[in-house]
Image (cartoon, grey):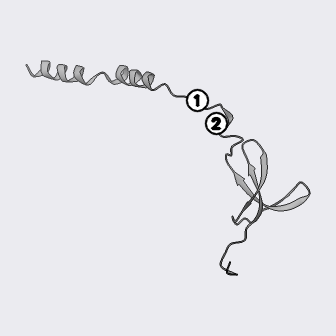
Amino acid sequence: MKPGIHPEYREVVFHDMSNDFKFVTRSTIHTREKIEFEGKEYPLVKLETSSESHPFYTGTQKIMDTAGRVEKFRNKYGSRSGIAKSAEAAAE
């Protein structure tokens, strides 16, 4: 590797703020904050979500009922054919 052109690749602590989960991995991300973790000082990156809190990975993902959504839409706004028929009836 050429010296001076690559970012520093080092260990960084990522902190999931939603559930206070922390993990160490290697990254080139630049941070101003530092944290003491497991007896060593690391740069700190704060996250809103990670695999520990994301619904897809935790199994708490809510599955949407698409058929129910379509029926709800039709009940609220009616069907296209009903609108067309009422327009024809008004024209007569």
Instruction: Give the spatial CA distance, label 2 vs label 1.
Output: 8 Å
Q: Residue at x 72, y 54 (%)?
A: 46
Q: How many marks?
A: 2
Q: Residues within 10 Å of mark 1 (few under 14, many from 20)?
A: few
Dot 2 and dot 1 residues touching (CB under 8 Å): yes
Residue 22 pos. (x, y %): 79, 49
Instruction: Tell me the amino acid under the disc marked 2.
Output: Pro
Residue at position x 66%, y 38% from top? Answer: 57
The percent position of residue 76, horizontal first and vertical second, equals 37, 22
Residue at the (49%, 25%) spot, across then down: 65
Q: Which residue is mark 2?
A: 55
Question: Looking at this view, is 1 or 47 the one in front?
Answer: 1
Eyeballing the image, is 36 above or below 82?
A: below
Looking at marks 2 and 1 on the same chain, the residue that comes earlier in the sequence is marked by 2
Residue at 7% x, 19% y: name it: 92
Q: Nearer the viewer, residue 18 or 25?
A: 25
* Residue 84 in the figure: left or right of residue 91: right
Q: Which residue is mark 1?
A: 62
Relative to 76, 42 lies left or right:
right
Q: Which amino acid type is marked by label 1?
A: Lys
As drawn, 56 above or below 38: above
Tell me where residue 24 sits by quadrant: bottom right
Q: Farthest right residue?
A: 39
When the figure is inspected, residue 71 is found, relative to residue 45, above or below; the finding is above
Quadrant of res 74: top left
